[in-house]
Image (cartoon, rainbow, N blue to C red):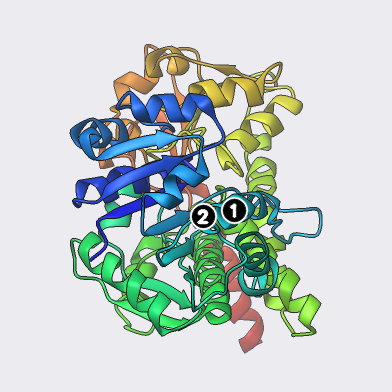
Amino acid sequence: MINDVSVIGLGKLGGTMAGCLASRGFNVIGVDVSQKAVNSLNAGHAPAQESGLDELIQQNKQRIRATLDHEDAILNTDLSFVIVPTPSDERGAFTIQYAAYAFEAIGKALAKREKYHTVVLTSTVLPGATRYGLLPILEKFSGKQCGKDFGLCYSPEFIALGTVIRDFLNPDFYLVGEFDERSGATLESVNSRVALNQAHSKRMSIENAELAKLSVNSFVTLKISYANMLADLCERIPGGDVDVVSDAIGLDKRIGRRYLTGGFGYGGPCFPRDNVALNFIGNYLGASTPLLEVNDNYNRTISPRFVDKLTPHLRKGATVAVLGLAYKPLSHVIEESAGIYLCLALSNKGFRVIGFDPLAREEANSALKMHALVSDSLPACLQDAECILVTTPDEMFKSLNPEECLLGKESVTIVDFWRCLPEVFHDHPKIQYIPVGRCTGNAGMASIETLRGLWAESTD
């Protein structure tokens, strides 16, 4: 039974994996090229920002240590998770340069190890990368043979930033791409002790697992885009409400309700790039994948479309508050964030923009420098705002009341992209409340005339 594991790469996912594995009784050695990350983990602190991670590591620090030395980790553990960056290149493909560096160091360490060791790549890669790009590096620098002297698996995680701990310990399933039966069985034995929910390990070839990882994320983006299309339709149909429609069709077992909440487009560090990468590999292999390209293009039109819709309703030079600068609640990540896009676009159109986010203030400050202010507090952000845009359904925003938004002003316009504000906002006499995905107010009257015109024409 394996009790000693290593985690190579101590970023948001790797650092959380180290804490979670230790919490399940494993002795963990973390490896990173950053002295700061190593020092943080050895001091019992999170090497990267993630909700709840600092507390988890402090609770289990007796089973965790970190090092800069790959050899130390490989010689003193029986299984290694490799979770290093695989950034996108200009083609939309994933580069494996950081993974190659780690595999070279692991290979050199394996050369000095007598016992069998299993290497598990967790970073997202394109099909073929593990077997044809990285395995040869292990065999070259170890002088050993995969399957005989060491094992190899590809096993990515399905997690969301902000809830990584929960997702890692309660996965829907484990995706195990195995070089051979022994490699897969070894990893499955570890997985069975990690999951709190007795999740099943779905074992397959390495290439099928690489494709499955990209396919899951890309399919979810298609579902999000479909929900946003429904929201646009609902705004144009009398009484239309995307939540009502989504609740209904989500009851169909073939569809399901998750990710069917129309609002903003998908963002963050995974969904956009995984969809683009799957289209890249499809084109490279000669497969027909235009659906993926159309999906990406549609998603990129959503934020500009909202800017065009908002601009005619705002006084020139008006102060606009943007609530939500991270790409989602419970995260400090602003990559592909709709809130950041809106701040920049509205600023470029001459509006005074001030943003607020509970976690992403530092990151947003860097991104919005010279374009928008980033407030240290929610009341300060709302103080002078004539228009308030709620771009993420953060609990802090959901608990707002009308007085906190008005602050003595005669009126205020609120655009609620996720329809998350309480009902008291809906018919408030001093608030023009605009819920994205619902047909209300003047738009409702216009939609009646438009729809009536369609059927009047058909009966003439």
Question: At 54% from the left edge and 57% from the top edge, which residue is drawn?
Answer: 123
Nearer to us of marks 2 and 1 is: 2
Q: Horizontal placement of 359 versus 295: left or right?
A: left
Q: Residue tagged by mark 1?
A: 108
Question: At 59% from the left edge and 41% from the top edge, which residue is drawn?
Answer: 335
Estimate how packed mark 2 is, as few (under 14), some (14 to 19) or many (20 or more) residues with alpha carbons within 10 Å. few
Q: Horizontal placement of 40 versus 88: left or right?
A: left
**313 and 228: which is toward the camera:** 228
Rendered position, 73 above or below 41: below
Estimate how packed mark 1 is, as few (under 14), some (14 to 19) or many (20 or more) residues with alpha carbons within 10 Å. many
Quadrant of residue 255 within the rendered picture: bottom left
Could you give the CA–CA distance between mark 2 and mark 1, rounded to whole angstroms? 7 Å
Q: Point out residue 322 in the picture as x, y percentages from the top left corner.
A: 52, 29
Q: Residue tagged by mark 2?
A: 112
Question: At 36% from the left edge and 38% from the top edge, which residue is drawn?
Answer: 394
Q: Point out residue 352 in the picture as x, y percentages from the top left corner.
A: 64, 18
Quadrant of residue 265 within the rendered picture: bottom right
**6 and 204: which is toward the camera:** 6
Which quarter of the rendering shows the N terminus? bottom left
